[in-house]
Amino acid sequence: MKNKFRNTESTIKAGDLILTEQPFAYVLSSKEKGIRCDNCLEKGKVLKCSGCQFVHYCGRSCQRDAWADHKWECANLKRVSPKVIPDAARMLAKIINKLNRGDGHSYRAFYSATSFRMWKDLMSHYPDLKADTKRMEHFTSLCGVLFEFLKDLSLPNNVELMGLYGRMIINSFTILDNDMNSIGTAVYLASSIVDHSCNPNAVATFDGKTINIRALTDMPYLDWNQIRISYIDLMKTPYERQTELLENYYFLCQCDRCMDESQMKIVHAAKCLNSECDSPVSIPWKEDCLLVRRPEERLENGHTMNGNCDIVNGLPRGDDSVRCEECGTKFTVQHVELFVKTMEFTELHLQNMKGASVAYVDVCNYCLERQEGVLHPMNVMHAQTLDHAFDALILVQLWEKACDYAERLIPCFRFYYGDRHPLLGLLYLKYGKILLYRMDLQKSLQQLKYAEKILRITHGDKHPLYREYLLPLLGQAMIESS
């Protein structure tokens, strides 16, 4: 199936599908092996390929559809069995095979009637890769796997191979399921035209392996030079977002949102001691706490000053002159120390939970108890803790507490993700479903209507999440609440 695109001359409304595309190459994540079909990526009962005993299919139709791409891989997977090929090596092998044996070099992916992208148009960032020690180590390890795996293919020389690797890692999309969890990786040639912004005007969602890019705002016409999606999770400080983009994509984001001084005052803010005041209070809590990266400044001697960054503020720890700029409420040394300890404690536990597959309810609750009245409600660490806690409570089916956290999490999601983001729509959907289960019907209906308004824009009314999951819940809530 070829990619479909929107006419660039017509007006664009929020929710309009501006590009849909099949992948140039893709792999199902190894953690989903035996759970999802390697062709359509649907979750359900699957059967092993009788040849390699490695990939799985949900039926003969998918097996036939995948055979042209899988037949060369099947023999190689069987030969190296029981060794498991890393996802990145398997993806790079698929790209090499497509370029050597298929139409990879001539394949054109159109994003307008006259504009298209080919494999050679993708940026490899070769000089950046050469200077990136971590990625060079990864590339070297992949080469070792490929030499063993692709016995039947003559591999490109090292320079060409590194160019292929660079194009793959810089331009890959993470394929997400309906719950926005990662299930695979793919390269989409046409979609790679879209640049990043932390304040995007478009969104990429997935229906199986198909990518759909939809507009989030109204536009007089479609200008691909102005279309922006987010490459990363946005619930972070500007400095953290910029660092992630710099390390993974080799550019320094300077979008309006990253440079927004008002956001910088909130992301690590304390709550004002005056219960009548909602203003954030900036308190330094660790040495060189960087909130944003500024562009390099060239000095008179021709050298550049790297990492020129703003700091929370210049006040030393424990300075009793910390005051709320809005109401003037003064913070004592004890108040400042409490804030510092709470931030340090939260940072430690968030780091521990980052590597865990499931957040611990008791840890989240303890963090939130310590944060109460100390961290500003929009403080990014407070928001991240709430997010972990909400997911953990759903897993253990503590519905009442989950509802409490959902109420507190919604303003955080609106602040960090904006009013039209799939994650906000999913939060409303999950919250509405819990309320429906608890027979809080009017409130459930309200939350599901919020979810419908967002997901119709981000996913479209034909997406399975909208049509097969949200609409039945919404219909049930409407019937039971009438």
Image (cartoon, helix red, strand yellow):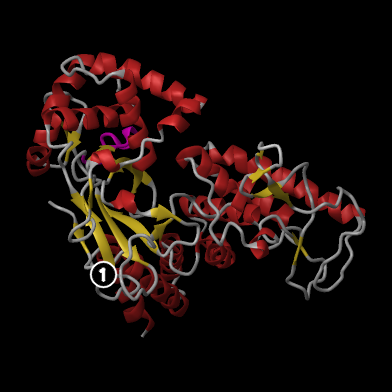
Counting from the top left corner in percent of width and height, residue 210 is at 23, 52
Is 433 left, or right, of 405 in this rendering? Answer: left
Residue furthest bottom in the image:
482
Instruction: Say which residue label 1 marks.
Output: 461
- Quarter of the image holding residue 326? bottom right
Q: Of helix, strand and loop, which one carries label 1?
A: loop
Instruction: Give me the residue at 19% from left, 34% from top.
Output: 56
Amino acid bearing label 1: Asp
Q: Residues within 10 Å of mark 1 (few under 14, many from 20)?
A: some
Q: Provide residue 204's location: percent of width, then percent of height.
A: 34, 56
Determine the residue positioned at 39% across, 23% down.
Answer: 139
Above or below, comparing residue 382 to residue 123 in the picture: below
Whether residue 76 is visible: yes
Q: Is 307 contained in the magenta span? A: no
**Residues rendered magenta in the picture:** 28-37
Q: Quadrant of the C terminus?
A: bottom left
